[in-house]
Image (cartoon, helix red, strand yellow):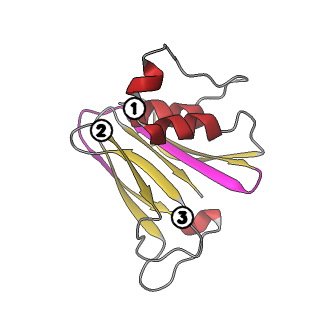
């Protein structure tokens, strides 16, 4: 999925990040995905393995400047349900699940379309994510 591909920019350790672009990609790709591709860093200050299992799923966080990019992919044929603790990356929340600062979340919906959300509610700082089969997600905070 597109969200899987967006996540690889954070997951993979490459000296040069690139995306396969053809002239029609610039017209066919959603604006939110193009904005992400323009903004994703190519150098990282810190990296953390969050969770994963070979052949099943992987979640990695990388820091560039003062921003964390947390990305995950699901290599399974079933939906992966994951509780991501955003407090572990310095974000605080009130009792209603509202974050102290804004963050952005990209993921796949059940139709395998990329969805972008601005600061979705996170109960107790936990963002419950459903990663579609062969899908992915990215959180930028």
Residue sitting nearer the eye, 98 or 46: 98
* Real-space Cα separation, disc 1 to disc 2, in angstroms: 7 Å
Residue sitting nearer the eye, 56 or 3: 3
Q: State the image coordinates of residue 9 (x, y, percent, origin top left).
A: 57, 32
Query: Residue beneath label 1, please?
Result: 2
Q: How many marks?
A: 3
Looking at the rendered structure, the secondary structure element under dot 1 is helix
Residue that appears at 74% across and 57% down: 66
Query: Residue beneath label 3, please?
Result: 86
For residue 74: magenta? yes
Q: Earlier in the sequence, mark 1 or mark 2?
A: 1
Q: State the image coordinates of residue 54 (x, y, percent, origin top left).
A: 45, 32
In this picture, residue 27 sits left or right of residue 79: right
Looking at the rendered structure, the secondary structure element under dot 2 is loop
Residue that appears at 35% across and 30% down: 1
Determine the image quadrant of residue 113. top left
Query: Residue beneath label 2, please?
Result: 113
Q: Which residues are magenta?
A: 65-81
Residue 77, compared with residue 137, is above or below; it is: above
Nearer the camera: disc 2 or disc 3: 2
Q: State the image coordinates of residue 18 (x, y, percent, origin top left).
A: 61, 22
Determine the image quadrant of residue 121. bottom left
In this picture, residue 68 sits left or right of residue 104: right
Q: Earlier in the sequence, mark 2 or mark 3?
A: 3
Tag 1–tag 2 contact (CB < 8 Å): yes
């Amino acid at each position: 999925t597109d969200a899987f591909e967006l996540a690889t920019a954070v997951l993979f350790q490459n000296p040069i990040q690139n995306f396969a672009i053809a002239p029609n990609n610039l017209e066919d790709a959603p604006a939110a995905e193009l904005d992400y591709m323009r903004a994703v860093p190519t150098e990282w200050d810190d990296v953390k393995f969050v969770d994963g299992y070979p052949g099943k799923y992987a979640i990695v966080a990388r820091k560039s400047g003062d921003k964390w990019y947390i990305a995950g992919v699901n290599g399974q044929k079933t939906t992966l349900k994951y509780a991501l603790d955003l407090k572990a990356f310095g974000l605080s929340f009130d009792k209603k699940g509202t974050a102290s600062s804004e963050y952005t979340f990209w993921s796949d919906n059940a139709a395998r379309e990329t969805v972008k959300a601005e600061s979705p509610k996170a109960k107790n700082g936990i963002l419950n994510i459903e990663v579609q089969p062969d899908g992915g997600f990215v959180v930028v905070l």
